[in-house]
Image: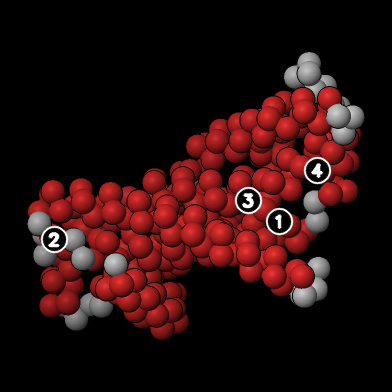
Amino acid sequence: MFQNIGEMVLLFWQTLRALPLTWRQRDKVLDQCFEIGNASLLMVTVLSFFIGGVLTLQTGPTMVERGLANYVGGIVGFSVARELAPIMMAILIAGRIGSAMAAEIGSMRVYQEIDALRTMNINPIHYLVLPRLVAITVALPMLVTFSILVAWLGGAVVARLTAEIDIPLQSFFENLKAMVALKDVAHGVFKGFCFAWIVGIVACHQGLVTRGGPRGIGRSVTKAVVNAIVLIVISDFALTRLFVVLGSFGILK
C-alpha cells in the first residue's frame, strides 16, 4: 500500500513538472476533454436531476410537517453544492473514465507499446499521463458545476409536483438563493479539482504497473476504480474537515 502511494505521489510530481509541455499535447487534451465532458453530459443530467429529486423527497415532507417548508430549497441547494454533486460526479467519472484510462494504458503496457515509446525516446508520462490528467482536471469541475444546477432544478420540479410538499418554484429558488452562497458552490468545485487529480493519477498509475496479460488488465481496472472511490471518500472527509477548521478561524467566511 505504501509503495503504491509513493509511486502515485512520484507520478503526480513528474506530471506537474511536465505541465509546460501541455500545449504540445493539446490535441490529445481536447480529445480527452470531449470524452470526459461532452460524452458524459446525458448521464450526468439524469443522475443529477434525480439526486436533487430524491433529496427533496427525503427532506420535504418532514420539513412541511414541522412548518419549515420554506427551508427545503436551501437545504437541497446547500447539500448538493457542498457534498452530493462533487462526490457523485467523482464516483461516476472514476467508474466511467478511470476504468477506461487504466484499461487503455494497461493494454499498452502489457503489449509492450510503452516500451516502444521509450525506444523512440518518447516519455510515457508526457505522452499518456499528462493529457489525461489535464483533461480530467478541466472537465470534472465543469461537470460538478453543471450537476449542481441540474440537481437544483430537479429538486425544484419535484417539490412543485409532489402533493405532500407542493412548494412553488419561485419560493424554492428564493430560499435557495438566501441560504446558498457563492462560496458553497466554490467549495464543491474545489473538491471537483481534488477528486479529478485522484481519479487521473490512480487510473494512470494502475495502467502503468499492469502485469500478466488480459487478466492483469482486468485486475488493474478493478483496482483503479475501487482505489479511486476509497480515496475520494477519504479525501472528501479531509477536505470537509479542513473547510470547517478554516471557517472557524474566519478564513473562509
Q: Which residue is mark 2?
A: 211
Mark 2 belongs to which amino acid?
Arg
Q: CA distance from mark 1 to mark 4?
A: 13 Å
The amino acid pointed to by label 4 is Gly
Residue at the spot 25% in from the left edge and 61% down from the top edge: 207
Give percent across and percent down for residue 77: 74, 44
Please identify the quarter of the rendering in which residue 208 is found.
Answer: bottom left
What's the CA distance linking mark 1 and mark 2?
41 Å
- Classify residue 162 as left or right of residue 229: right
Mark 1 vs 2, N-terminal side: 1
- Give the labeled residue for mark 1: 185
Are there few (<14), some (14-19), or many (20+) residues within 10 Å of tag 2?
A: some
Q: Would residue 105 appear left or right of 44 to someone viewing this image?
A: left
The amino acid sitting under disc 3 is: Glu
The image quadrant that residue 71 belongs to is: top right
Q: Residue at x 13, y 71 (%)?
A: 116
